[in-house]
């Protein structure tokens, strides 16, 4: 089926909230919406949602965004996050790549400045020198063979027998205490080594521990703080 655009509205009967959006595709292609909050809620309880198609657009994506924008502007700002899942009340952006006219002008500017820079011998020489060191020539058989060899074994798919062996090995490790060698290996890793070697002392008691424990349970949060201050007074 040929793709087309449509503007839709979702209704969440549990929260009594709406979401207005648009999509270029088909109505049964599985697309939900672009809102993370509404999509997560839909995946948790799809039975509470229902969708209605407001308008279909067969001309272009730009016309589709214009139709969606006209409906979003009818939402009041105070209704955001309360009555509507929508956060943005417009689809018309001011960035250069979303506007055809600005896009064309910007591309012309980039093209002209690039040509102007390439006419300078020192820039051209620097560019060609850097280009010679890069393996970006995908049509070169030597480059393609080098890339092929570098990827060997990286995308290897395990067989069912290998997966089953890995699962059985993992089950055998459940409840088994770590060996001294394994514990020592964990301690010597960068993160744990830093935590275990850097010891600090609480200002209000004699506890000595790592930075995380002191920040959570000691110093200004220490239960002996009041006793220590009373003694000082």
Image (cartoon, rainbow, N blue to C red):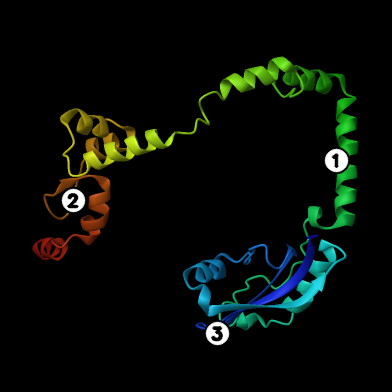
Give the mark nearer the N terminus: 3 vs 1. 3
Residue drawn at x 88%, y 65% is 59
The quarter of the rendered structure image containing the N terminus is bottom right
Task: Note whether 157 is above or below 225 in the view shown.
Answer: above
Hey, which residue is sitting farthest top in the picture? 142
Point out which mark residue 110 bears. Answer: 1
Q: Is residue 157 left or right of residue 69?
A: left
The tag on residue 211 is: none
Give me the disc on residue 202.
2
Residue visible at 54% across and 68% down in the picture: 37
Task: Tell me: 10 left or right of 57.
Answer: left
> Would you say the residues marked 3 and 1 are in contact, meaning their CB atoms lie under 8 Å apart?
no
Residue 205, compared with residue 187, is above or below; it is below
Q: Is residue 197 above or below residue 215?
A: above
Q: Badge 3: few (under 14), some or many (20 or more) residues near its Cα, within 10 Å?
A: few
Q: CA distance from mark 2 to mark 3?
A: 51 Å
Horizontal and vertical percent position of residue 76: 67, 83
Identify the mark nearer the N-term, 2 or 3.
3
């Amino acid at each position: 089926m040929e793709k087309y655009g449509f503007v839709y509205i979702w209704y969440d009967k549990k929260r009594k909230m709406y979401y207005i959006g648009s999509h270029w595709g088909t109505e049964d292609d599985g697309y939900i919406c672009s809102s993370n909050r509404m999509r997560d809620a839909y995946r948790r309880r799809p039975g509470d949602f229902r969708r209605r198609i407001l308008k279909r657009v067969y001309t272009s994506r730009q016309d589709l965004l214009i139709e969606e924008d006209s409906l979003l502007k009818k939402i009041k700002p105070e209704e955001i996050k309360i009555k509507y899942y929508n956060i943005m009340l417009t689809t018309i952006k001011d960035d250069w790549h979303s506007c055809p006219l600005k896009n064309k002008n910007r591309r012309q500017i980039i093209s002209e400045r690039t040509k102007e820079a390439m006419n300078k011998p020192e820039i051209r020489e620097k560019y060609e020198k850097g280009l010679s060191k890069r393996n970006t020539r995908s049509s070169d058989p030597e480059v393609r063979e080098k890339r092929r060899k570098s990827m060997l074994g990286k995308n290897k798919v395990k067989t069912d027998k290998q997966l089953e062996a890995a699962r059985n090995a993992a089950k055998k490790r459940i409840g088994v205490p770590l060996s001294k060698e394994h514990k020592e290996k964990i301690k010597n890793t960068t993160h744990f080594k830093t935590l275990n070697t850097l010891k600090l002392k609480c200002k209000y008691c004699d506890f000595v521990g790592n930075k995380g424990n002191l920040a959570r349970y000691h110093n200004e949060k220490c239960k002996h703080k009041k006793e220590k201050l009373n003694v000082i007074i």
